Amino acid sequence: MTTITIKNGKNISQTKFENIEELLAHFMGKMGYGTLLPLDEEDITAERKKIFEKALKTPKSKMLNI
């Protein structure tokens, strides 16, 4: 077990996590951050492919600059 102290932070609702991945997912969900992970060609589902193709057709003026 590891204890982490965050000074000047807010209390969090969940304090026990199975692993670091669960902790990171919790914080990313709270903060609205996402994770970009590369996919192998065979892992791309039809739904993901459709979303990707839609994104490619979106004009740059409608894209969010992050």
Image: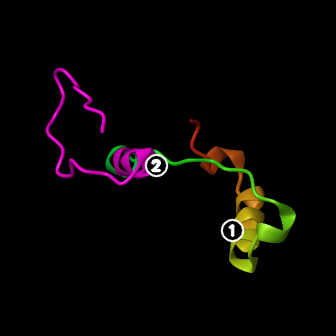
Q: Position of residue 18 (x, y in %)?
A: 36, 54
Question: Dot 2 lies on which element?
Answer: helix
Instruction: Answer with left or right where residue 46 lies relative to residue 8.
Output: right
Inspect the magenta stretch and tell me whether residue 12 lies in it: yes
Q: On screen, 32 above or below 66? A: below
Q: What number is the disc on residue 51?
A: 1
- Of callouts 1 and 2, which one flags the residue occurring earlier in the amino acid sequence? 2
Please name the residue shown 77% across and 69% down the image.
44
Quadrant of the image occupied by residue 5: top left
Instruction: Answer with left or right where residue 53 lies relative to residue 14.
Output: right
Please name the residue shown 63% across and 48% down the image.
36
Q: Position of residue 25 (x, y in %)?
A: 42, 51
From mark 1 to mark 2, how far is it between C-alphas?
Answer: 26 Å
Question: What colour scheme has been applied to the protein in the rendered image?
Answer: rainbow
Foreground label between 1 and 2: 2
Q: Which residues are magenta?
A: 1-27
Q: On screen, 42 above or below 24? A: below
- The residue labelled by disc 2 is 21
